[in-house]
Amino acid sequence: MNPAAVHADPTTRTGVSVRCVNVVQIYTTAGGHDVVALRGVNLDIRPGEQVALLGPSGSGKSTLLSLFGGVLRPSAGKVLIDGEDIARIGEADLGRLRSGKVASLLQGATRNLLPYATAEDNIDFARRAVPASRRRGLLPPRQLLDRLGMGPLAGRPITAMSGGERQRVAVAATVSSGAGLLLADEPTSQLSHDDRDAMLGLIHQVSDEFGTTVVMVTHDPEVAARMPRSITIRNGRIGSEGRHGFDYAVVDEDGAVHIPDELATEFPAGRLVRFEQADGGLLLRPLEERGHAE
Ligand code: ADP
Ligand code: MG
């Protein structure tokens, strides 16, 4: 498979890495009080990885996406996009990062598209922000749509498409700039089962063929399980990571490990536990407090 087909020159690689080091994000509300949205996130995403961000409402998923997209700068810590620290680069470089390396799929397909234009024209339009020198190196819109199996939609106006088709065209238009990082906030939330599957298939295809790194927010565990890697955000921190259907706790920079939610009643905050080496793993042994009925 050609790893960089969004570019006419197949040797151009697109995948962008993402790295977070102790990232803290604090919002100051209109009322003047602080909301800590992220409290020390450490994360490494390699070029071309496909990652789902899971987690309850308010856990910090969208905040993390805004940081990856260069829309926000972290209150503390480092966010490195393709090795560039977004807290340290100037506004001009941040703008270049936003328009060149990152592609954000907004919630609601039509917000990404011109409704009365065709799929092909939408891709042309989406590429307007790409400098002409770089645009010349990209596949023509028609060929890009063919490549993604959407050739039959090329000449059709968005208004004449189904919701699922619109969402797929929105993905094509979003990645058509040749950006190496695709960010999507709940891209499957309003789709039928079939459209959701087609959408996931397209996201996998884009990443496999173009080398694009994908970070996708979802609240649907079924969707997350179909991504090679899923990261659960809990209360502004990485809670756990899923690989191939198994959930793993993550050891943090300072050695902290988060207890899975389902064990939270057995291991409440402040509980003393000891680690013991055991056959084939590690045993967590809580201290039996005197007078502690168990
Ligand atoms: P999620 O996407 O997981 O639902 P968010 O990243 O949107 O979570 O929000 C994380 C926390 O930050 C929440 O407590 C939310 O209320 C707060 N928050 C998000 N955006 C703002 C903002 N612009 N101003 C103040 N608080 C915010
Ligand atoms: Mg959100």
Image: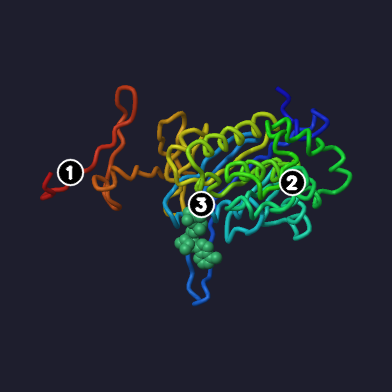
Q: Amino acid at mark 3?
A: Lys
Q: Position of residue 216 (x, y in %)?
A: 56, 44
Q: Amino acid at mark 2?
A: Thr
Kindly identify the residue that appears in the image at 67 percent across and 36 percent down. 212
Q: CA distance from mark 3 to mark 1?
A: 37 Å
Q: Nearer the viewer, mark 3 or mark 1?
A: 3
**Could you tell me if residue 39 is visible in this image?**
no
Q: CA distance from mark 2 to mark 3?
A: 33 Å
Q: Secondary structure at mark 1?
A: loop
Q: Which residue is mark 2?
A: 118
Q: Position of residue 268 (x, y in %)?
A: 27, 50
Mark 3 and 1 residues: CB-CB less than 8 Å, in contact? Answer: no
| Mark closer to the chain start, 2 or 1 | 2
Q: Nearer the viewer, residue 51 or 112?
A: 112
Q: Position of residue 156 (x, y in %)?
A: 72, 43
Q: Secondary structure at mark 3?
A: helix
Mark 2, other Cα within 10 Å: few <14 / some 14–19 / many ≥20: many
Kindly identify the residue that appears in the image at 69 percent across and 32 percent down. 148
Q: The C terminus is located in which quarter?
A: top left
The quadrant in which residue 281 appears is: top left
Q: Secondary structure at mark 2?
A: loop
On residue 61, the disc is 3
On residue 288, the disc is 1
| Mark closer to the chain start, 2 or 3 | 3
